[in-house]
Image (cartoon, coloured by chain):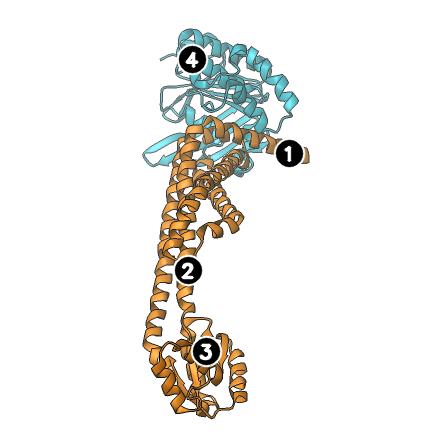
Amino acid sequence: MIHFKNISKIYSPHMVALENVNLIIKSKEFISLVGSSGAGKSTLLRLLIGEEPPTMGEIIVGDVSINSLSHQELPYLRRKIGTVFQDYKLLATKTVYENIAFAMEVAGKHDLEIMEDVPQVLSLVGLEGKAGQFPHQLSGGERQRVAIGRALVHRPDILVADEPTGNLDPVNTWEVINLLLKINELGATVILATHDNNIVNNLERRVVLMDKGRIIKDDEKGKYLI
Amino acid sequence: MKEKILTALKRVIKSGLNSFWRNRWISTATIGVMVITLGLITGLFLISVVAGSILSDLEDKVDISVYFKLETPASDILKIKSELEGLSDVKGVEYVSREEALAKFQEGHQNNPLIIKSLEELGGNPLEASLNIRAKVIDDYESVASFLESSRFAGLVDTVNYRQNQKVIEKLSSILATVRRSGLAAILVLAIVAVLVTFNTIRITIYSLREEIGVMRLVGASNWYIRGPFIVEGILHGLAASLLTTIIFYPSVLFVSPKVSAFLSGIDLAVYFKNNFFQIFLLQTLVGVALGVISSLIAMRRYLKI
């Protein structure tokens, strides 16, 4: 379970990114965070992975209050959360295989386990033949699938996807969304931030609508209407 | 636990070797700048060795002599000698007896019959016994001279030639001090400039990898796991630069050495370089590795804050 309690993020009096946000996300839920650019979706996700601290309020993941984590403890939180970004954030100097293996290596997984799991994930995201290639040799859709592979290879409890389809064409978009659904079926909580109403309306899952740093609507099986 | 650390170490080393090779153009640039830095430092080091040996050669040529009155018994002079040798400023004292002085004088003027003849006419030995004193440092002559003039033996002393040469010795001493001081300052400044240039090159490299470092943090890597490969790379850069510098320097020193010896006799750079080869190589490697590792660590700090 993830609990955002009275979260505010204020960069300056004129730049309030989040204002008193309260949100509970149940375990194994698939939730879409929608709203126009600048609504505060990305900020909320950044706070969740501890990239920045909130100005006020508390975020609880499982039974851990992440505000109380030290800089040294943050990596342990992040190993439980898989993250996918709009700009992929792959390691440019590592191959596809190494990018995915990296998430397991940092968690101190055994070599044998890595050799077993990475090929499985590669086939799950449909990149069996591209293991030895570097990110710059891949298309946008392929890069995003590598990023998803990296995010799910260490079997995280939570998968956070921040506009994962923002740079993709419709075909690749649906491949990515279907992967997220599959990961959710396998037991992970998925939080998807997007401004693509087409995706949200087809998913028929919980939708949280944000605007100007506030949550203005929260529907089970919601639609995103503009 | 131990196994985990070993696994992490293995991965860090492998990743460091990998990125050393994959970023070989960046590595080459870094090593290139480092070779220049190490070359400069080694060059300055050798120059300071040459300069130092010139200066101490010069210093060694300075000594003072004390001449004793004719009737002074040799046993008194030897007593003074041993007392002088007890002084901490004194490096060595040489006793020249009246007979030795005469013998030297005759030898020095054996081709001048006029002087030999007048010496014979004088009958007896007109020369005084003396002590040649060498101080450890050129500035100490003043205190040695005043010791002689004020000691209980002062009555036996005829002249101390320091007083005649005092101006010259003081002048030389101040020139030596200035040359040493400004030489050291110049070496330090140049070395600092070279180190800063290397540091900046590495900083730019790390800057180009800042996003990569941030991504590693976001994927859950600990700071030391991220730093590790950079440390490995820094060590490799240092080692490679040190090897390359040696490969360049060795033949250069062999080539330059005879020319230096021709100018300044008594200085053999090649022999010095060969005798101290391992110390110089070790120094270069240490400087290179420290420069590579410390620069990376400092340059990375801000990108690890995520």
Q: Are discs 3 and 2 both within one chain?
A: yes
Q: Chain of mark 2?
A: B
Query: Residue flagged by tag 1: what amino acid is it?
Result: Leu
Q: CA distance from mark 3 to mark 2?
A: 24 Å
Position of B163 relative to B9 (above/below): below
Q: In terms of image quadrants, where is residue B202?
A: top left
Between tags 4 and 2, which lies in front? 2
Chain cyan in the figure, letter: A
Task: For label 2, count other residues whose C-alpha is less than 10 Å away and answer few (under 14), some (14-19) or many (20+).
Answer: some
Which labelled disc corresponds to residue A139? 4
- Residue A34, horizontal then vertical, whole percent: 42, 18
Which chain is drawn using orange? B
Element carrying mark 3: strand
**SS label for mark 4:** loop
**First along the sequence among labels 3 and 1:** 1
Residue corresponding to mark 3: B132
Distance from label 1 to label 4 (Cα)? 37 Å
Q: Residue at x 52, y 16 (%)?
A: A132
Label 1 and label 2: CA atoms lie apart by: 48 Å
Residue occupied by mark 2: B52
